[in-house]
């Protein structure tokens, strides 16, 4: 089915309010999810709502939890304290906003958190405020280290964003080649996958999605090294759980996830006037756009441009949800007495 | 030929003194180069001395140049002002050391610089002082953007390092799949290269090293996105030259390189006690070492471990230099009246 983005957001907001969230918090959480859907990152969109509900039911996420904040110099440490990742991350962004104005650069560490949607959401928010931002999060192990045959670290995303005259230029990447969601889609369709996506139980790269037991890091030792960097910043430094101690969002209801996030905000204006920076960014983007294309490509893009194009298309034409997702959302709506709006806007 | 690392360093120090460097500066510069050789990164070692000499002769690098420093909050901006990259970077590290103690996190931007050796050298220096460090530098274009057939950005390295109980855990990676140096080695040996290293003039990936006109980014859009991040921080933000405006170290003597570097230092102790952090790092490394190996691997390593093993082996057994490099160094030595020491220690 196809659904209008703003209708989906309104519905998700209402739903989250019935789960106990403050209206403002519910709207923010819904915004992070629907923004992912609009940008084509459906794996991090409203499909997550059922798991979020299950973790509230298990008492592992508390909609009215109050995160605990400690500040020191240009650093802020936040214990999510049972709040969902998105609300802990919003608090981190707001704290950074003040600290970076004072110091020129600032960092936030969040522990005791959960899945927080896409890392890029927070990076772009900071970029719209004139900051360069880096945002990382650790996550449940599902990726082998280079040379290993069992998972050690998660897909450990790394996002950055920087101001430009239009949309921020932004990158939001898993440090693995692919995502487990894509392997499952190939499995459902019985199609082969590229040999660099995952390994079988013997640690051998496989093209059979049904044989995949763990993902491969992007570019071998480089992706593994970047995932390690994300684990050091997001897990070791924040005081959150590390590697196998992280609670799996979908199948471990014995404990909180205790995921950690780390954010950096850089005040561009401390380095050069923001207008100059934006002009230089636009100049770099223009250079990229002018590069002649390789066979099979229409245009060279800058990071974030494909997702911005998808967002514009979906804002205009709606978001396509798979039937299974729509059914799951409809069931959540029925349980809460907030009917899921069928059909397009 | 094989040469002892400390003899090589002493000789390079003497050589650099005859070029006009202060003894202390000469020793530091030599240390950065020989450290690269010891770690197996010969492309960034003493092989660079001939090019460094050529740029001094062209008046583009001045051994006694004084970099210009401006501080604001937790940020320091440095104009290398004709000094070589290594000495500008050393100053940045020293400035960061003070700023990070005050603010908990600090950043340095260097513009007007040159090739500075390996980014990891400075990251590890900061890690040995109890900091987590990220160091990047932009560089001359030689890598196509994803979907392009001409080079836009450089190999744009990204390094990080973090304290552990032994050597710092560290990553120092090009954001391209490979380095042009490796393509040239394959060309000299007439051996095929992997298809993801580079493209030919039509933008098509090639296994013929002689046909390579530009390198490919690691993992396609991910490596391109990371190279863009490095260009934004190292070039756009610092005020250095960007992309094609960077002067090529080897074949453009019409202007300074005007490379830019960006560094971040994080004071671990602002987040958690350093001893706790080190124990958590060691725990993560132990988890990595315990992962069962994939076929063809003896042990899962942590980032930086292969280079540390090479360093130990070369400290004990000496550094193997190709004949062509040894001849070039011998000629530089003859010119300066500082005989290149032949044979092992």
Image (tube, coloured by chain):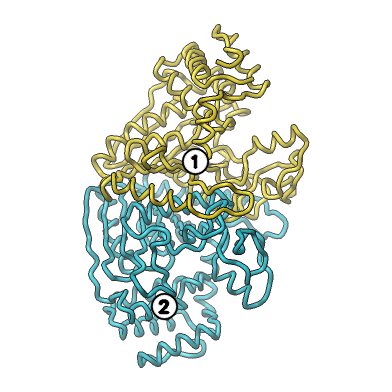
Chain colours: A cyan, B yellow
Q: Mark 1 points at which residue?
A: B305
Rendering quarter of residue A112: bottom left
The residue sitting at 62% across, 51% down in the picture is: A290
Quadrant of the drawing holding the N terminus of chain B: top right
Packing grade of label 2 (10 A; few <14, some 14-19, many >=20) is few
The residue sitting at 35% across, 49% down in the picture is: A266
Using residue A324 as the reference point, say whether residue A64 is left or right of it. Answer: left
Using the image, name the chain to which the residue with label 2 belongs. A
Using residue A180 as the reference point, say whether residue A234 is left or right of it. Answer: left
Where residue B55 is drawn, which disc sits there? none
Q: Mark 2 points at which residue?
A: A51
Rendering quarter of residue A52: bottom left
Asked if badge 2 and badge 1 are on a common chain, one would say no
Q: Where is residue B204 in the image (x, y as percent from the top left)?
A: 73, 51
Q: Position of residue B55 (x, y in %)?
A: 55, 22
Label 1's element?
helix
Using residue A298 as the reference point, say whether residue B283 is left or right of it. Answer: left
Establish if B152 lies above or below A343. Answer: above
Rendering quarter of residue B141: top right
Q: Where is residue A12 in the image (x, y as percent from the top left)?
A: 39, 82
**Viewer-side residue, A155 vs B264:** A155
Using the image, name the chain to which the residue with label 1 belongs. B
The residue sitting at 41% across, 31% down in the picture is: B89
Q: Position of residue A164 (x, y in %)?
A: 45, 55
The residue sitting at 32% across, 42% down in the picture is: B106
Label 2's element?
helix
| Cα distance between the residues tagged 2 and 1 | 39 Å
Of circles 2 and 1, the one toward us is: 1
- Is residue A72 visible in the rendered image? The answer is yes
């Amino acid at each position: 089915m196809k659904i209008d983005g703003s209708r989906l957001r309104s519905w998700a907001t209402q739903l989250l309010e019935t789960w106990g969230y403050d209206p403002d918090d519910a709207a923010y959480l819904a915004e992070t999810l629907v923004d992912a859907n609009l940008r084509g990152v459906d794996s991090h969109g409203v499909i997550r709502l059922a798991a979020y509900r299950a973790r509230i039911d298990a008492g592992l996420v508390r909609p009215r939890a109050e995160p605990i904040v400690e500040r020191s110099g240009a650093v802020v440490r936040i214990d999510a304290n049972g709040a969902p990742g998105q609300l802990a991350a919003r608090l981190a962004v707001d704290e950074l906003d003040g600290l970076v104005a004072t110091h020129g650069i600032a960092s936030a560490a969040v522990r005791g958190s959960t899945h927080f949607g896409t890392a890029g959401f927070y990076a772009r928010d900071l970029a719209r405020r004139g900051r360069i931002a880096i945002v990382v999060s650790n996550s449940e192990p599902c990726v082998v280290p280079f040379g290993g045959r069992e998972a050690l670290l998660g897909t450990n995303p790394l996002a950055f964003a920087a101001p430009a005259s239009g949309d921020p230029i932004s990158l939001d990447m898993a440090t693995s080649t692919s995502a487990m969601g894509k392997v499952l889609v190939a499995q459902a369709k019985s199609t082969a996958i590229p040999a660099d996506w995952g390994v079988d139980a013997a640690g051998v790269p496989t093209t059979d999605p049904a044989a995949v037991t763990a993902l491969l890091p992007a570019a071998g030792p480089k992706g593994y090294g970047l995932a390690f960097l994300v684990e050091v910043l997001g897990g070791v430094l924040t005081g959150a759980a590390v590697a196998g101690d992280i609670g799996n969002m979908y199948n471990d209801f014995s404990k909180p996830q205790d995921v950690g996030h780390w954010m950096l905000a850089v005040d561009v204006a401390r380095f050069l006037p923001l207008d100059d920076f934006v002009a230089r960014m636009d100049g770099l983007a223009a250079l990229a756009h002018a590069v002649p294309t390789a066979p099979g490509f229409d245009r060279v893009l800058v990071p974030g441009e494909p997702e911005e194009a998808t967002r514009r298309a979906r804002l205009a034409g709606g978001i396509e949800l798979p039937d299974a997702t729509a059914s799951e959302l409809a069931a959540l709506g029925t349980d809460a007495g907030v009917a899921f709006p069928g059909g397009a806007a």
